[in-house]
Image: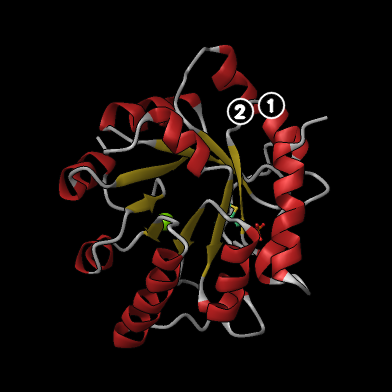
Amino acid sequence: MTTYTKEQIKQLLKIYFIMGSNNSTSDPEFILEEALKGGISVFQFREKGDGALMGEDKIQLAMRMQELCKQYHVPFIVNDDIELALSVNADGVHIGQDDENAIKVRKMLGNKLLGVSAHSIEEIQAALDAGADYIGIGPIYPTSTKKDAKAVQGTSLVEIVREKNFSIPIVGIGGITVENARPVIQAGADGVAVISEISMAENPYKQTIELRKAVFDQA
Ligand code: TZP
Ligand code: MG
């Protein structure tokens, strides 16, 4: 388990920004810094898909993005690549169902954060048993960012998890925007994870602030 409390993790998940170099048309480091200034609460480095950097280029970008996150005291999480996460001493790792086994990853990570994507109660229970710190649920809405995304599920699984009184921190993901973020929180998610809503925004700084309003002002 991590050095964070469950409540702290729930706060970290509020505005969860994910990006790799191929998720934007402009400089990814510029976008990350704008998002950090706007108030993201955690960042996930997700360097995958068409045109993704590999080898030393990937490591160097990860380290520069990690440094930016440190300046703003925002945790830096690595998607899938446990070796990279350990070598740069990241704050955590996020894995999907097709990645390394969660029990094994938990052991490798020690007290770093472990997030797991899950699409059913069974997968959520297995992630909990493996010692996951939080669960990613989605795609909530249609997304064109992840080509192999599972079927859109709306907020139903988030609601079911809360009805069952699971207190695990949850972040919703997939097609989330300033306009449609509120129902995700109202369904019981602690936060929203977004790629394109910030990475493709005309003004990533302002978009982050707007997303914060949607998540925090639930009126
Ligand atoms: N996992 C489920 S949907 C998704 C991931 C990584 C993509 C989210 O991207 P966007 O642009 O916020 O829809
Ligand atoms: Mg994965």
> If the picture is divided into quarters, which one holds ligand 2?
bottom left
Helix, strand or loop at mark 2: helix
Q: Which colour assignment does the render follow?
A: secondary structure
- Locate residue 86, reporting x and y percent: 21, 62
Residue for badge 2: 158
Q: Is residue 51 left or right of residue 216?
A: left
Q: Which mark is residue 79?
A: none
Say if residue 218 shows up in the picture. Answer: yes
- Locate residue 18, reporting x and y percent: 54, 61
Say whether mark 1 is within 8 Å of ligand 1: no
Residue 169, compared with residue 141, is above or below; it is above
Asked if the residue at tag 1 contacts the one at tag 2, i.e. Cβ–Cβ closer than 8 Å, the answer is yes
Residue plotted at (49% across, 43% down): 12
As measured in the structure, the alpha-carbon distance from the residue carrying label 2 to the one carrying label 1 is 6 Å
Q: Is residue 137 left or right of residue 113?
A: right
Q: Amino acid at mark 1?
A: Ala
Residue toward you, 96 or 173: 173
- Locate residue 25, reporting x and y percent: 67, 83
Question: Which residue is situated farthest in the top direction here?
Answer: 164
Residue plotted at (38% across, 72% down): 67
Q: Which mark is residue 187?
A: 1
